[in-house]
Image: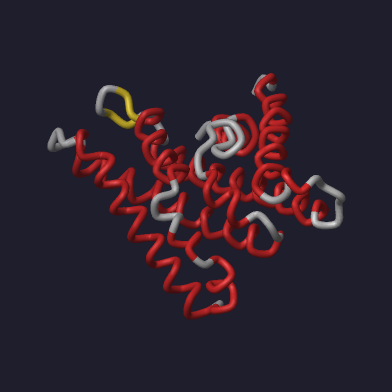
Amino acid sequence: MDLSSYITILISTVFINNFILSRFLGLCSFIGVSKHTGPAVSMGVAVIFVTTMASFISWLIYYFVLVPYHLEYLRTISFILVIASFVQFTEIVIQKKLPILYKIFGIYLALITVNCAVLGVAVLNTDMFFLHGKAVSGSLLKSLVQGFGAGVGYTLAMFIMSGIRERLEFADIPHSFKDVPITFIIASLMSLAFLGFSGFKI
């Protein structure tokens, strides 16, 4: 097993190809839940679970069902069903175990179901780790690492954004820039900052 390739995938998905700041996927929950650090990090942990498990199940479905029966055109529908199932499971667990956190998340927890970042991870896994209908060496583990890394990158972006927005509550900001406008400006600056990681040679 070539450990360096897995480390490269992990670093790439967290910093270089961050799904929020580089690919601009999952911006809805990124803007909506990043007002405070606690809920932002909790949402990040939920996304890590969903992206990792969705990567695992979607790989199994693609490898054992879609490819052998030449049903690759059903990939998007299949992956959406997988993601929706795991989000529903996550939502039930949080509602039972952490009802306060469930109230804080509100509608944004359900929005993980239609979070294009989660679907993007599953689709990207099949695009990168399957060549001509055949899985590359270590395809399943690479898919899991990429799914986990994407969730970690999402959590990192949420943590940084929530920290900045908490500080901005005490800043003197012009009324026209408060809330969403300043949030988009910060997201743009963060994206530019993360663009610097693209120069890394791994």
Rendering coords of residue 152 (x, y %): 60, 47
Q: Position of residue 67 (x, y in %)?
A: 20, 35
Residue ranking furthest to the left? 69
Using the rendered view, name the quadrant where residue 37 is placed.
Answer: bottom right
Q: Residue at x 65, y 50 (%)?
A: 158
Picture coordinates of residue 52 (x, y %)? 46, 51
Residue appearing at x 58%, y 72% in the figure:
101
User: Closest to the observer: 191 or 154?
Assistant: 191
Which residue is rendered at x = 33% and y = 46% of the image? 58
Image height of 160 relative to 120, above or below: below
Q: How is the image coloured?
A: secondary structure
Q: Quadrant of residue 170?
A: bottom right
Residue 141 placement, left or right of 19: left
Name the side, left or right, on which 3 lies relative to 192.
Answer: left
Vertical side of 166 occupied by 16: above or below: above
Between 82 and 34, the residue placed more toward the observer is: 34
In-front residue for pair 49/116: 116
Position of the C terminus, as image quadrant, is top right
Give the answer, above or below, for where 184 lies relative to 111.
Answer: above
Q: Above or below — where is 90 with respect to 185?
A: below
Image coords of residue 118 (percent x, y): 44, 46
Seen from the viewer's position, the closer of residues 122 and 135 is 122
User: How many marks can you see?
Assistant: 0
Residue located 31% across and 46% down the image? 79
